[in-house]
């Protein structure tokens, strides 16, 4: 099957390409003016990254910088090391950054590109399902602080995104399943056909060469494109729609779980648990019926994602949620559903509702 091009038509248009064997497209995306390329890659992926480095080296001066893997790499000290390396190599505004890795690498590399000389060209080559459907698309970049996840960042749209499904062949099964957390989330907030696909097939058949997985990837990316084109900077959507905030469905509790676990819980796993949690919040607040709330548990559980977690107290998670980017002052705000693909913002739910939903999330009650 040929590659599919999904255009992002915002203020700075670019294309997301989904397919197989896409490395040859990279020079065209980088453009003719680029002379130097900083290749920022997950340092554990050296063998997988080397062919890309070799290909780039034929045409460009390449500065390859291996990064610490996962959330541990999203630290200001790592960013500072990258800045120093770019400065020593003489990178100018006409040069570019290429990222190669999962969502954490994309977040970090995108932030380096956004901040070097106030913004240079960046192209993302995500190597994980999570990176393809979430971090690489939409222009959000960020690093973590002691106070929470992604609290420092910038909006910096890429020049292009190449989602080479061949790279998923080397991805551990647990990481592929974790990436499905963001995919299933998109089914609930915007495209219920995603839910039909994951509920009707055998999850074991979702592999790098699966046409169903490819459709899920394309559908999830399309959901994200549709949202970010209308609301790049998360200022709100039309007619009461949450806008880009809808993509954070399940993330308020999800990010709190990640932080409380020391990032031992993968992002997609935490999102799945967070979606189940916020569906219970909506059910207890009277806006979501029992069937749709229960479907959260079954849909995420069907693909192998966790739907309960009891690794921290309510008070610990509640405090962590207070520094969520959607909060306003002391008021917690959640993206909730009134039904499938009918999202809205719920501001200031009672502590009784939040605590009862937590008890359900831990498996203590249903």
Image (cartoon, rainbow, N blue to C red):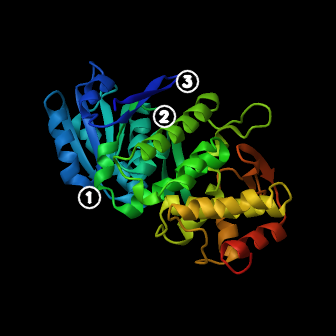
Determine whether 209 is above or below 236 in the image: below
Determine whether 123 is above or below 258 in the image: above
Query: What residue sits right under mark 3 in the picture?
Result: 10
Report helix, strand or loop for mark 1: helix
Give the percent coordinates (x, y) of residue 46.
21, 53
Depth check, mark 1 against mark 2: the one in front is 1
Query: What residue sits right under mark 2 in the picture?
Result: 156
Q: Is residue 341 left or right of residue 38?
A: right
Q: Is residue 199 left or right of residue 74?
A: right
Give the percent coordinates (x, y) of residue 339.
76, 48
Q: Measure the C-alpha gap from mark 1 to mark 2.
A: 26 Å
Residue 78 occupies quadrant: bottom left
Q: Verify CB contact (< 8 Å) between mark 3 and mark 1.
A: no
Query: What residue sits right under mark 1 in the picture?
Result: 44
Front residue of this view, candidates 28 and 212 = 212
**Which residue ends up furthest to the bottom in the rendered image?**
364
- Lower position in the chain sequence, tag 1 or tag 2: 1
Q: Measure the C-alpha gap from mark 3 to mark 1.
A: 34 Å
Determine whether 287 is above or below 54 in the image: below
Task: Say whether residue 107 is visible.
Answer: no
């Amino acid at each position: 099957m040929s590659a599919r091009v999904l255009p992002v038509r915002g203020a700075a248009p670019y294309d997301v390409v989904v397919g197989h064997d896409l490395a040859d497209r990279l020079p065209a995306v980088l453009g003719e003016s680029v002379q130097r390329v900083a290749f920022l890659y997950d340092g554990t992926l050296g063998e997988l990254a080397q062919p890309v480095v070799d290909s780039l080296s034929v045409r460009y001066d390449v500065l390859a910088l291996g990064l610490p893997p996962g959330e541990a790499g999203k630290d200001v000290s790592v960013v500072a090391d990258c800045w120093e390396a770019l400065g020593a190599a003489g990178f100018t505004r006409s040069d570019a950054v290429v990222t190669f890795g999962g969502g954490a690498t994309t977040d970090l590399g995108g932030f380096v590109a956004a901040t070097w000389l106030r913004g240079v060209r960046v192209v993302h080559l995500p190597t994980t399902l999570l990176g393809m459907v979430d971090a690489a698309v939409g222009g959000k970049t960020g690093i973590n602080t002691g106070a929470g996840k992604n609290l420092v960042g910038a909006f910096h749209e890429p020049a292009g995104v190449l989602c080479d499904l061949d790279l998923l062949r080397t991805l551990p099964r647990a990481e592929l399943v974790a990436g499905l957390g963001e995919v299933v989330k998109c089914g609930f907030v915007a495209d219920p056909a995603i839910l039909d696909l994951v509920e009707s097939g055998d999850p074991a058949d979702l592999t790098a060469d699966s046409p169903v997985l490819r459709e899920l990837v394309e559908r999830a990316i399309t959901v994200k494109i549709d949202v970010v084109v209308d609301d790049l900077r998360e200022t709100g959507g039309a007619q009461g729609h949450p806008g880009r905030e809808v993509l954070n469905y399940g993330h308020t509790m999800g990010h709190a779980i990640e932080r409380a676990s020391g990032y031992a819980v993968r992002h997609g796993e935490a999102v799945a648990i967070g979606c189940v949690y916020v569906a219970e919040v909506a059910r207890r607040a009277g806006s979501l019926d029992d069937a749709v709330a229960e479907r959260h548990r079954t849909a995420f559980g069907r693909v192998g994602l966790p739907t309960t977690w009891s690794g921290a107290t309510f008070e610990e998670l509640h405090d962590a949620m207070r520094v969520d980017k959607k909060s306003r002052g002391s008021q917690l705000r959640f993206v909730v559903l009134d039904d499938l693909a009918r999202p809205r913002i719920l501001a200031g739910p009672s502590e009784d509702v939040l605590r009862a939903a937590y008890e359900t999330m831990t498996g203590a009650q249903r």
